[in-house]
Amino acid sequence: MVSLKHLSLGVLILQTTSLVLTMRYSRTAETRGPRYLSSTAVVVAEVMKIAACVVLVFFEQGMNISRLGSTLRQELVGKPLETLKLAVPSVLYTLQNNLLYVALSNLDAATYQVTYQLKILTTALFSVAMLGRRLEMSKWVALVLLMTGVALVQMPAEAKPEGSKSHSLGSQVVGLLSVLTACCTSAFAGVYFEKILKGSRPSLWVRNIQLGLFGAIFGLFAVVMSDYELVVELGFLQGYNSITWTVVSLQAFGGLVIAAVIKYADNILKGFATSLSIILSTVMSYYILDDFRPSSHFFIGASIVICATFLYSREVKVNIAPIIPLIAKESQQ
């Protein structure tokens, strides 16, 4: 029988790998008509996430419509200040989601996967600065290794094989800057979210509804600012096909699935999921998407990043056995 731990490992790998690969394919595959607008895809994903979370809250409330309405009214309207606090992480997550489309339009999936691990570094730095956390020496070593590995991955290949799909230096810079900005926005939003909500215990799904509402509003603002003329001319859902809907669904529901299973995955399991996802993305980028030719720099850098991920995730065990007799002795006095 499959344990919950192994099931959560499979879900983490499937979500992380499939979203990146399908998003990359959807942004680079040849299309007969106009390509879908990434700004509208972000909004559609937020709306789908809100709908899914409302259904989940409905089940949490015993499938009682009146209790569902009461819960949503109490959390969304009855606590306006707490709801408004979520506007900051929401706008950052919306920016991050838009940036990921830009990144995967300009970087292959393998390079993106490795580079995006820099969110470990940015999250650590924001945690130290905003939450006052202290990191063990092993974690600082892991962060240095992480930066070294990502830097090696960014080094150009010695030669470009004929027939391979490659990007110009300019587009690679755009992709890299998009990933780096997404790492910063994601890290700051996550740490800020943890800081302002420490001590409050609302439903996970209610929190996602609150984030989704702000996300949809900010996403629509991005649509108006960047793609208003195209939407007016060809429609909000222009260029949508089965692949587009797959990407949007993975973005909307994948995060909710991970949120549900993440409690069953320890840090080592998360490290395995990250490593296997990098390996799968590399293999599939090479054999299926045919947009990636790994260099020796990439293999060395990716290996260092994987090792750094495991080192950072490793729990420092403290031997408390000698302390127990002392506590017992003091309690007897």
Image: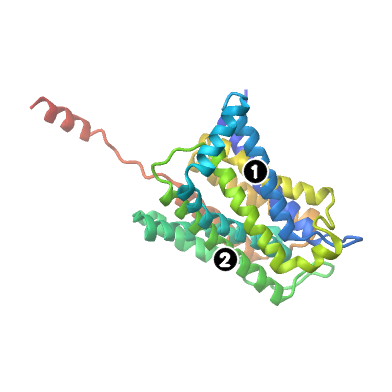
Name which residue lies at 76% across and 66% down. 228
Q: Residue furthest bottom?
A: 170
Q: Is residue 232 above or below residue 333?
A: below
| Residue 50 in sight from this viewpoint | yes
Q: Quadrant of residue 116?
A: bottom right
Find residue 44 and report its horizontal and vertical position in percent. 72, 51
Q: Disc 2 residue type?
A: Thr
Quadrant (top left/top right/bottom left/bottom right) for the C terminus:
top left
> Secondary structure under badge 1?
helix
Mark 2 residue crowding within 10 angstroms, few (<14) / some (14–19) / many (20+): some
Name which residue lies at 75% across and 52% down. 22
Q: Quadrant of residue 178?
A: bottom right
Image side of residue 42 versus residue 188, left or right = right
Name which residue lies at 64% across and 43% down. 50
Q: Is residue 232 above or below residue 10?
A: below
> Secondary structure under badge 2?
helix
Instruction: Write down the residue under mark 1.
Output: 50
Residue situated in front as seen by the camera: 266 or 37 = 37
Numbered mark located on residue 78 in the image: none
Numbered mark located on residue 181 in the image: 2
Q: Disc 1 versus disc 2: distance between alpha carbons?
A: 26 Å
Find residue 242 and report its horizontal and vertical position in percent. 83, 48
Q: What colouring does the structure picture have?
A: rainbow
Quadrant (top left/top right/bottom left/bottom right) for the N terminus:
top right
Find residue 248 and report its horizontal and vertical position in percent. 73, 49
Q: Residue furthest left?
A: 333
Image side of residue 28 versus residue 301, left or right = right
